[in-house]
């Protein structure tokens, strides 16, 4: 997937966080041509399976298959191969699965005969986690930002195209790894929103200013009474940024 020339409608990925096929399709139809990219995560994929991805592709939409593969290398390789058969544009794995696991996923994509290959992205630290929650799952003291950067470098060295991180970490990642290393940022909230289950959040404008390549947004847009209007307002406010 090529990054150059992408418009804002390509760079804001709408999260179809529902188990309902009907609801997911209604959201997509309500947004229309204002968005081209949708995230299908564990909730929707577990409930509806590949058919919802196939429907999105048949309707000309790009798909971020957000299943965060994290298993032994052979299993992750086979999962990535199955994802390739769905013709998705972004696939992700957990960086904490280690270099061998990541390299297995990289090799599967490299060896495929697809003309346009998907981006392989690594999840660093979930945006729902803060310093205290990260510390609760580690033995020695760990600085959250340093840990995110460590995982991003590990992923880059193993062949990833980029990472999922909070917008707060994008600047450091771009400075130390390079501008072409893709940063996808969930935890994006409008100024009027509550943080809900997210800890490391940022507005769309600030996230693009920090260098984010893609923003993942869900309830801020899709739960609105006029989701297309909200999305177009974000486009207007972010025009020329990033």
Image (cartoon, rainbow, N blue to C red):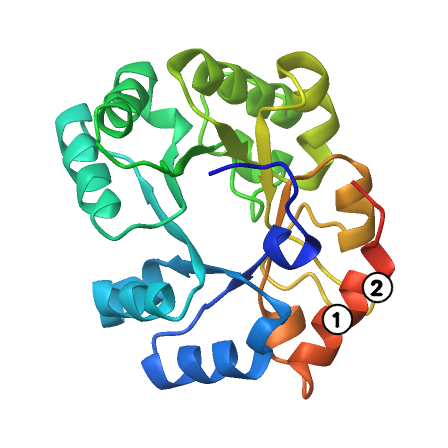
73 left or right, relative to 45 = left
Neighbour tally class for label 1: few under 14, some 14-19, many 20 plus, Cα within 10 Å: some
In the picture, residue 71 is in which quadrant? top left
Closer to the camera in the image, 30 or 96: 30
- x, y percent for residue 67: 33, 49
Closer to the camera in the image, 115 or 221: 115
Query: Tags 2 and 1 in contact by the CB under 8 Å rule?
Result: yes
Residue 189 numbered mark, or none = none
Identify the residue shown where x is 70% and y is 70%: 231
Identify the residue shown where x is 67% and y is 13%: 176
Count all numbered tags in the image, as a single digit. Answer: 2
The answer to whether 100 is drawn above or below residue 94 in the figure is: above
Identify the residue shown where x is 36% and y is 36%: 117
Mark 2 sits on what residue? 236
In the picture, residue 207 is in which quadrant? top right
| Observer able to see residue 203 | no
Q: Residue furthest front?
A: 115
Kindly report the distance in space between the C-alpha atoms of the residues bearing marks 2 and 1. Answer: 6 Å
Q: Identify the image quadrant of the C terminus.
A: top right
Neighbour tally class for label 2: few under 14, some 14-19, many 20 plus, Cα within 10 Å: few
The answer to whether 32 is drawn above or below residue 99 in the figure is: below
| Observer able to see residue 130 | yes
The answer to whether 217 is drawn above or below residue 128 in the figure is: below
Identify the residue shown where x is 69% and y is 85%: 226
119 left or right, relative to 180 = left
Mark 1 sits on what residue? 232
- x, y percent for residue 173: 65, 22
Closer to the camera in the image, 240 or 216: 240
- x, y percent for residue 133: 55, 39
- x, y percent for residue 27: 51, 80
* Callout 2: SS: helix
* Callout 1: SS: helix
């Amino acid at each position: 997937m090529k990054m150059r020339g992408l418009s804002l409608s390509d760079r804001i990925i709408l999260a179809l966080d529902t188990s309902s096929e009907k609801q997911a399709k209604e959201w997509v139809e309500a947004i229309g041509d204002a968005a081209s990219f949708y995230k299908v995560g564990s909730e929707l994929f577990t409930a509806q399976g590949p058919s919802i991805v196939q429907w999105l592709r048949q309707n000309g939409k790009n798909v971020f298959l957000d299943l965060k593969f994290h298993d032994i290398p052979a299993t992750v390789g086979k999962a990535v191969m199955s994802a390739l058969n769905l013709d998705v544009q972004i696939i992700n794995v957990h960086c904490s699965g280690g270099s061998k696991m990541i390299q297995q996923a990289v090799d599967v994509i490299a060896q495929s005969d697809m003309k346009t290959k998907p981006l392989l992205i690594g999840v660093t630290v979930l945006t729902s986690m803060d310093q205290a929650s990260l510390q609760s799952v580690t033995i020695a003291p760990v600085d959250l930002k340093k840990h995110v950067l460590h995982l991003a470098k590990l992923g880059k060295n193993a062949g990833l195209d980029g990472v999922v991180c909070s917008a707060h970490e994008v600047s450091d990642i771009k400075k130390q790894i390079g501008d072409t290393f893709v940063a996808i940022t969930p935890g994006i909230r409008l100024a009027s929103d509550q943080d809900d289950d997210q800890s490391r959040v940022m507005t769309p404008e600030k996230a693009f200013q920090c260098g984010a390549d893609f923003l993942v947004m869900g309830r801020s847009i899709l739960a609105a009474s006029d989701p297309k209007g909200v999305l177009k307002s974000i486009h207007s406010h972010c025009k020329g940024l990033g």
